[in-house]
Image: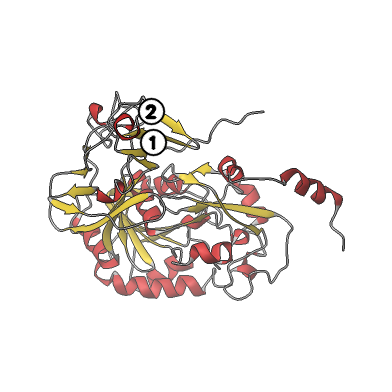
Amino acid sequence: MPMSRPYLDMITRTLGITANTAVRQAHACKLCGGFAPPFDSVDFYKYCSPTNPFAFGFAGIHVEYRRCRDCSFISTDFFDDWSSEEFAAYVYNADYSRIDSEYADIRPGSIATMLAERLAAWRDVDVLDYGSGSGAFAEQMSARGFAHVTNYDPFSSPSRPDGKFSLITCFEVIEHTVSPIACVQDMISFLAPGGCIVFSQPLQPDNIEVIRGAWWYIGPRNGHASIFTTDALSRLASNCGLLLHRGDWLHGFGAQDATETSREILAAIGTPYAWLRLDAPEDASSFAPQRAQQVDAWHALERGGNVRFRWTRSSRIAWHDVLPQVYPLRLRVSVPFVNEITPGFAGACKVEVAGQVLTPSPDPRGELLFETTLDAPAENGVILHTPELASPHDLRGFADDRPLGLAIPVYPWEPPATTT
């Protein structure tokens, strides 16, 4: 069948494209504000099947996903302006059981079996199952001796419950949300002081950049708008004032002032984990507490290509009050950079945290990565130590005599202005 003329016209208009096209189509990451360029596009009818994701054919509607270069969060804005009524009509409708046959009974039963075993010591805790679907999980937990389980689902059980809950469970839910931050904040509104959240969430496989949208869990017909990594979950937690407790398939969110019961529940689920990206400050004259504190540590804000950044003007850059005070803590520190004053400058940098001096792991994406475990409370700050700075004048005879080190991005990422 010959290609239709409108498509030929579209192709004609795109001839001669460059990488700038991807920059123009990029968005700021919904979680960390990082650069999120196009990642893949799949048909709306693709659903979560590892063997035959197009068993129901093609809708002829493209759903575009983007992936953040920093936290690796994958998201689509396809559903961003959908109403609850539209989700109910076009995703969570009578056909939903065809594309998720385990949704009604099988998955709630298997999750209840797993969770009841892990949380057997806390059967008296007040539980809210958020995004509960039919309520089968609450029934299964009650049958296993958990006497105080309430269910809430914005589609199937839309009446919002009264009171606060010490434990909120949330299974296969946050991938369905167009705004994961708003979703977790809504959960927090039901959370008793010091309570915790236990949730399930498959994470992107290591080869996601190879298989891309072919990964079985990227399924717009299932309503999957948000696809996570451990770093993305960590950023989601910190955006909501919580800390990720990383597990295998079950994970937890808890506050630093969690109750003893919550700490015990979270310990049964996973271990504390934090991903920390060290940014250049957007406004060097009025630093927020979580930003670098030294006004004289940075040069003026600049823009190069699609990135806003600041050059460092000191060989010692400190970020204060950035570490969660939960121990032991697995910590991953990222220092992105867009330029270095001399080749090899970035690789010679070190990070000091809790008395440890760390050397970076090599990474091809233009960032320094440092990983460690913090076993006990320490000074709440991270210090970047760089080699001696140099000026373009001294190096190459240019007019610029500023001492420069690393050019570190400013977030959130902002697309360059378009010209007409």
Is residue 272 among what the camera can see? yes
Residue in front for this viewpoint, 333 or 165: 333
The residue at 59%/71% (across/down) is 49
Q: Nearer the viewer, mark 1 or mark 2?
A: 2
The residue at 73%/63% (across/down) is 58
Is the C-beta separation of discs 1 and 2 under 8 Å?
yes
The residue at 44%/65% (across/down) is 202
Note whether 272 is above or below 297 in the view shown. Answer: below
Q: Residue 316's image quarter?
A: top left
- Disc on the earlier residue, 1 or 2: 2
Whole-percent x and y of residue 334?
32, 49
Give the position of the N terminus as an image quadrant: bottom right
Residue in front for this viewpoint, 77 or 122: 77
Whole-percent x and y of residue 294?
22, 30
Whole-percent x and y of residue 321?
21, 40
Note whether 354 is above or below 396 in the view shown. Answer: below
Q: Which mark is residue 410?
A: 1
Secondary structure found at label 1: loop
State left or right for residue 44 relative to residue 208: right
Residue in front for this viewpoint, 49 or 342: 342
Q: Which mark is residue 301?
A: 2
Three-letter code, disc 1: Val
- For label 2, the crowd category at 10 Å Cα-Cα, with few meaning under 14, some 14 to 19 and many 20 or more, is some
Three-letter code, disc 2: Leu
